Image (tube, rainbow, N blue to C red):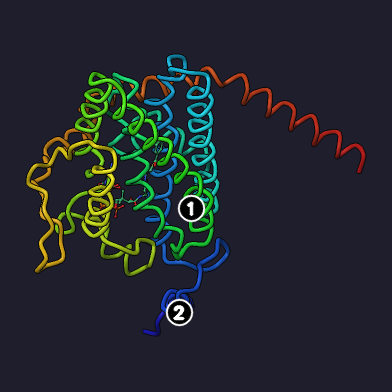
Amino acid sequence: MSAPVIAVEDSEEQAHFDALIDADLRIEPRDWMPEAYRKTLIRQISQHAHSEIIGMQPEANWITRAPSLKRKAILIAKVQDEAGHGLYLYSAAQTLGITREEMTDQLIEGRARYSSIFNYHTPTWADMGAIGWLVDGAAICNQVPLCRASYGPYGRAMVRICKEESFHQRQGFEILLELSNGTPEQKQMAQDAVNRWYWPSLMMFGPTDDASPNSARSMAWKIKRFSNDDLRQRFVGMCVPQFEALGLECPDKNLRFDEETGQWLMSEIDWSEFDAVLDGRGPANTERLKRRREAHENGAWVREAAAAYAAKQSAKDRIAA
Ligand code: BYC
């Protein structure tokens, strides 16, 4: 029996796709791509978009309580930036054939993942500093290589996002620096916030390489350029001198650089905490999803008004044509 024609076409298409990846060129929305590549991208980009949107909540909690007008203005700008990042990323995912409605439903029905880090509370102003410094710092470490992701719309979205993330990271560092140089109580508040966010920030990079089912394939496709553990190592190395500059202590008392292997040796991460957060049992999972659902319901009238306006405009255009 002869092979079906589709298989021949597929293998030619596959060879062209492989050649583009090998040559470090970009795959664009209209290019042929293997179904598994498309699915992986939809998974990662939509999770990333949801993270940006849910990630607005822990900081938005502090907008009304920011300690000065300047701090309030900066925080509002940062939270708005996160909304923008979510929108670029939803648009990038839409180029792969999923709709915004489908992604939104997956999120509000609790069927989608978003970054574990946003399931923690922000009890003090110093948490705004720790999020900016550690969470945005970890995000930059993870996201700069994504600017070279093989899928064009994702890589291009990441370039804009990373520019804004570096401003976010600096504003967080500066909040902590000011607190650290303030009264002993303020310094303690900064240290406590860093103690709360340090380990969850390391978990942002995902499970260890030997427990990461998606890494090998995503790296072969040049979506991910570095493994979870390599990026975690890079992040820890970046933090060490910054802890010193801040005058704060690293919560990992065992952290040391091993000259022989060129690796940072660190205490074991509590992966049971990570698993619990991914399973919906983190400190703020329920609250985050509830708030997101309410925001979606409260925005229904805006979506209806926009759809009615668009229908009116296209009716007008039809009459004019
Ligand atoms: N949290 O095989 P693995 C921001 C999941 S927002 C939750 O290593 P992969 C900001 C993973 O999805 C920035 N889930 O997966 C916003 C997979 O589950 P499924 C957010 C996690 O994809 C507001 C399973 O575990 N950044 O900066 O190869 C304010 C196995 O993992 C996590 C991004 O989204 C986690 N931490 O690698 C402030 C970056 N880790 O889907 C700041 C883009 C792993 O198989 N994403 N999982 O059920 C990535 O780079 C990669 O997707 C990851 C995971 C490194 C996160």
Q: Considering the numbered disc 2 on the image, is that residue within a helix, a strand or a loop?
A: loop
Q: Position of residue 232 (x, y in %)?
A: 24, 53
The residue at which mark 1 appears reads as 158
Earlier residue among tags 1 and 2: 2
Q: Where is residue 82 in the image (x, y as percent from the top left)?
A: 48, 36
Q: Where is residue 67 in the image (x, y as percent from the top left)?
A: 43, 17
Above or below residue 91? Residue 51 is: above
If the image is split into quadrants, where does the C terminus sit? top right
Which numbered disc covers residue 67? none
Tell us which disc is closer to us: 1 or 2.
1
If the image is split into quadrants, where does the N terminus sit? bottom left
Q: Position of residue 36 (x, y in %)?
A: 37, 61
Question: Residue at (11%, 67%) from the top-left corner?
Answer: 261
Above or below residue 257? Residue 52 is: above
Which numbered disc covers residue 23? 2
Nearer to the camera, 308 or 223: 223
Q: Is residue 22 left or right of residue 218?
A: right
Identity of the residue furthest to the top in this view: 65
Identity of the residue furthest to the bottom in this view: 2
